[in-house]
Image (cartoon, helix red, strand yellow):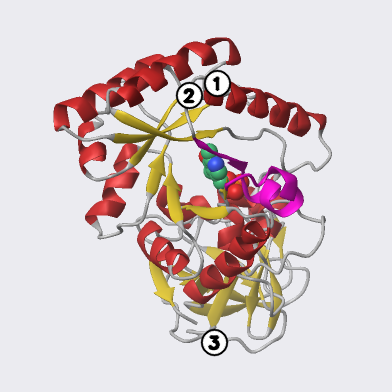
Amino acid sequence: MSDQPARRADLRVDLGAIRHNTRVLSARGRRSGAATMVVVKSDGYGHGAVPVARAALESGADCLGVASVDEALQLRTSGVRAPLLCWLHTADDDFGPAVDADVELSASSVGELDRIAAAADRRGGTARVHLKIDTGLSRNGCPPAAWPTLVERAAKAEERGWIEVAAVWSHLACADEPGHPSVDRQAERFQDAYLRARAAGLRPIRHLANSAALLTRPDLHFDLVRPGIAVYGLDPVPGVGEHDLRPAMTFRSSVVGTKRVAAGEGVSYGHRWTAPHAVTLALVPVGYADGVPRGLSGRMSVWLAGRRRPVVGRVCMDQLVVDCGDDQVHEGDEVVLFGPGDRGEPTAAEWADGLGTIHYEIVTGMYRPRVTRTVVEA
Ligand SMILES: *Cc1c(COP(=O)(O)O)cnc(C)c1O
């Protein structure tokens, strides 16, 4: 893990882990006859959309998913040519460049569908469209009451050659709570919507499963699965089975100074921690501006000089302080703030638990102006 010393704040992204996870997940989908869309929205959940996309496509992914047209076009500009879907549009998104770049577009309403069809008509192309039904998440997606109108309209636009309806799709609200009754309810509504699309003359594929449903509900794989978080090695349903995933992100820094303080000395702003006896403190040049949550002050540890050691006192904007007891630590020593956990270092999941949030929020928030990101094959 110490291939290159971290200087100040370094995110190390292990593409070997991305490849491994993609192989594991796409094999699970293939067992049900499903292809795999790897979701690389929000810059690949903070890991780097382009290197993640490339590694995933070489390891079993068939296509990619992102939220916005802009994210899709950035991948195209970087030379990623694989099939690519985006689904969250703004009122003034111009779909023309997406049509030109062969980006597949989700449509949740007649308004979106018409704008996509018009863009394709203007460009003289055909847009590949995934019609999204809201089966119970109540975010985007077409409400069931409006669905018959949407599929009729889509069938007409398909006849005119403006669009090709590639898929009917939806997204689950509670897939990370296996057994939650909403999952089956959503699956039923999904089936109704699909049958309605077939009745309108459309011949779409179906996709519904995120990481959690991919791992826990093979009966909901349909034609395509859409894992995101699991590709990055984070367990979408902690405590439910062993999924052989490897976390891809490690956050490291290094010791920039050490000092001995006497019993009774207060440490960091507010003196929320006082040395109970003489101790050696290590100063680490990362703080909440670098993604270390201040909310973990007094409740986190780091891996340093062969073991876990507590961060003491408040996490500051630019720095934090580690209690090293009577041990020898040195300027330049590597500090692992979180990683896969193999060596006993903290994990992103542990940070999330400490904050009452989910690991998704941790990893997507780590890449910041002072943080470097190093992509390695390891
Ligand atoms: C983010 C997202 C996914 C991936 O979800 P994970 O829980 O990260 O696997 C799949 N589908 C849609 C529509 C999404 O927005």
264 or 44: which is nearer to us? 44
Quadrant field for ligand 1:
top right
Let me know if residue 110 is in the magenta part: no
- Image quarter in which the N terminus is found: bottom right
The spot of residue 333 in percent (x, y) is 53, 84
Whether the residue under disc 1 has CB within 8 Å of ligand 1: no
Q: How many marks?
A: 3
The spot of residue 81 in percent (x, y) is 30, 57
Residue 330's tag is 3
Rendered residue at 27%/46% (across/down)? 73
- Which amino acid type is marked by label 2? Gly
Q: What stretch is highlighted in magenta?
A: 204-223
- Which amino acid type is marked by label 1? Ala
The quarter of the picture where residue 298 lies is bottom right
What residue would you read off at disc 2?
A: 201
Per the model, the C-alpha gap separating discs 2 and 3 is 70 Å
- Tag nearer the camera, 1 or 3: 1
Q: Badge 3: few (under 14), some or many (20 or more) residues near its Cα, within 10 Å? A: some
On the question of residue 233 being in view, the answer is no
What residue would you read off at disc 1?
A: 199
170 or 43: which is nearer to us? 170
Which of the two discs, 2 and 3, labels the residue nearer the N terminus?
A: 2
Let me know if residue 216 is in the magenta part: yes
Decide: is 240 above or below 175.
Answer: below
CB under 8 Å between discs 1 and 2: yes
Decide: is 209 above or below 313.
Answer: above
Rendered residue at 54%/87% (across/down)? 330
On the question of residue 247 being in view, the answer is yes
Per the model, the C-alpha gap separating discs 1 and 3 is 71 Å
Q: Label 2's element?
A: loop
